[in-house]
Amino acid sequence: MINIAIDGPSGAGKSTLAKMLAKKLGYIYVDTGALYRSIGLYMFDSGINPKDKDAVIEALSNIKIELRFENGTQKVYLNGTDVKDRIRLPEMSMYASLTSAIPEVRAFLLDIQKDMAKKNNVIMDGRDIGTVILPDAQVKIFLVASSETRAKRRYKELAEKGIETSYEEVLSDIIKRDENDSTRAVAPAVAAPDAVLLDSSDMNADEALDAALKIIEDKIR
């Protein structure tokens, strides 16, 4: 099986690129961020402080997350309910970042991700796919973009979904999350030694796709 890992900071365009690559190559796209956002959503709905490690760990036994592929797209079910829209709310970004720093949360989701990679040609995007989840992936890409570029993209995405926020708020959240993700003790968002850096700051989606396809071709030809 061919495994492709795409890592990078929040808002760099990992999910968009991964989905386009999966469609182009006929691979299964596994949105790992959706898994962590689902954990965060459960804590949010349950009134659990994501910084309360013991409370978060205790709540894991009440959570069942399923990845289902319906009509060619991945859907995430949290305790039987499709949560694909709610997990994209701005608050879930920080909840996901804080809960994902807890080792027990990462262990809880690890088996789901590894099992899919063993059985399918997959593309996964996240923070530590190439370093922790799929350390033996044939292709590892670390996708980056400037904070301002990422904030503009995320703000536009939220506006198109009718979610009210401001550019300044989105930019602030991205800067905070970068700090959390890159400095945490457990699985920090850093590039694997064998990852190829791809800066998409001045690229549109199609240009990033072409650049990524070239990287993949060079690695697995």
Image (cartoon, rainbow, N blue to C red):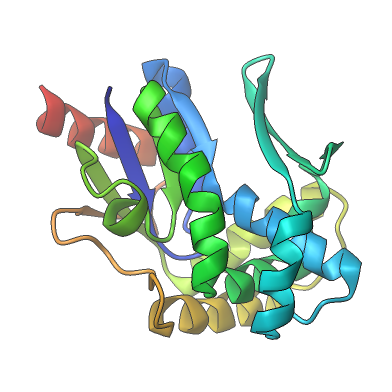
| As drawn, 169 above or below 129 | below
Q: Quadrant of the C terminus?
A: top left
Name the residue rendered at 72%, 58% in the picture: 61
User: Of residues 54 and 212, which is closer to you in this image?
Assistant: 54
Residue 199 visible in the picture: no
Task: Find residue 189 and report its horizontal and vertical position in percent.
Answer: 38, 69
Q: Quadrant of residue 40?
A: bottom right
Number of labelled discs? 0
Q: Quadrant of residue 96?
A: bottom right
Task: Find residue 55 and report its horizontal and vertical position in percent.
Answer: 74, 78
Name the residue rendered at 27%, 38% in the picture: 211
Task: Find residue 205 and report its horizontal and vertical position in percent.
Answer: 46, 40
Residue 143 visible in the picture: yes
Task: Find residue 68 and report its horizontal and vertical position in percent.
Answer: 67, 26
Name the residue rendered at 62%, 57% in the picture: 36
| As drawn, 66 above or below 176 | above
Name the residue rendered at 45%, 65% in the picture: 9
Q: Quadrant of the N terminus?
A: top left
Instruction: Describe residue 7's horizontal placement relative to residue 170 as left or right.
Output: left
Instruction: Describe residue 176's horizontal placement relative to residue 3 as left or right.
Output: right
| As drawn, 106 above or below 170 | above
User: Of residues 64 and 178, which is closer to you in this image?
Assistant: 64
| As drawn, 154 above or below 135 | below
User: Of residues 136 and 103, which is closer to you in this image?
Assistant: 103
